[in-house]
Amino acid sequence: MPEMPEVEVVRRGLAPYVTGRTIDRVEVHDVRSIRRHTPGADHLGDALVGRRIRSAVRRGKFLWLLDDHLDDALMVHLGMSGQLRVSAPPATDPASVGGPGAGPTGAAPSEGPASDPVKHLRVRLELDDGTRIDFIDQRIFGGLWLSPLEETADAAPAGEGDDLPLIPSSAAHIARDLTDPQLDVERTVAAIRRSRASIKSLLLNQQVVSGIGNIYADEALWAARIHYERPGESVSAAKVRQLLAEARAVMERALEVGGTSFDALYVNVDGRSGYFARSLNAYGREGEPCPRCRAPIRRHVFQNRSSYVCTRCQRR
């Protein structure tokens, strides 16, 4: 599943194409991808056509588009394999006027295989300048829907991409992520240390801190030398702060290179894959030597997920 860096790469890539543009047409090719919009496809199309998009906003793994009326937001959740792919006329393509090496992602150039932009097309938005935004989803765990807006609990901006203190109700339960300047780090530390749950499950709990998934949890735990099964209450406050700092650092490094792609299921809006997978220290490195101590990296099954751990650095 795309984690915070991958969704932020998509948001940055999408924003130049949609900001200030009006939705002219909506095509729903598979109603399963709008199942959370219970009024159905016709209602979604009627509600979206004519909207002028104000901004693309993200909190954690949730992405949404705001329009000028500020009554509700178009939610986009990528699920396991969702993509937003952009096709713009050359004269209006922001990537064509950015100079050498420029691209629509807002991050460093990435590389990798591009997935089929047609086979798994589920929803298409056409904008007033001819740009097409395609939602492609092979496994159909993601989707689009409209969600009413409400004020943020702390009256601060809801997420990255806009300064309004308005958040879709569908995302209001999601905690702030580690790159959010409004995050109360000490409150997050206290929440982790109050819990008997395993430290990894707490990192993955989007109501504790958002945006972290399996890959970056394993990488942060490796960096902080913490075993994934340790209860949150057994980890010192200083160690939890270090863990959160490591998680933020690894996600920021991933963001710089377009995120982490192991296959064509995650790509940027221009169809390119991120290449942070080359820089992973623990995740996916079963049997390889730990970069720090040379002991073998082991793969364990934890809560139906793979967890990668150094047998020497991260003692239980």
Image (cartoon, rainbow, N blue to C red):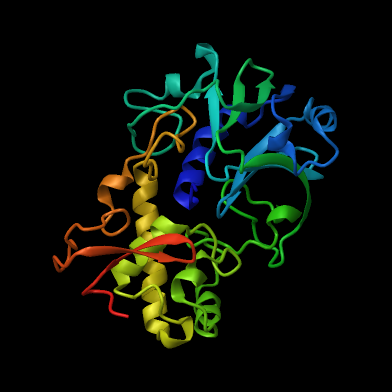
**Above or below, comparing residue 275 to residue 209 in the picture:** above
Give coordinates of residue 150: x percent, y percent: 78, 56
Outermost residue, left side: 294
Q: Quadrant of residue 39?
A: top right
Observer-nearest residue: 255 or 283? 283
Q: Quadrant of residue 16?
A: top right
Give coordinates of residue 312: x percent, y percent: 21, 74
Q: Residue at x 21, y 58 (%)?
A: 287
Query: How many discs appear?
Result: 0
Q: Residue at x 38, y 53 (%)?
A: 252
Q: Answer with left or right where residue 78 lies relative to residue 313.
A: right
**Above or below, comparing residue 309 to residue 250 in the picture:** below
Q: Answer with left or right where residue 166 lies relative to residue 200.
A: right
> Which quarter of the rendering shows the C terminus?
bottom left
Q: Residue at x 84, y 28 (%)?
A: 42
Residue 185 seen in render:
yes
**Above or below, comparing residue 93 to residue 215 in the picture:** above
Give coordinates of residue 288: x percent, y percent: 19, 57
Give coordinates of residue 246: x percent, y percent: 35, 66
Observer-nearest residue: 259 or 118? 118
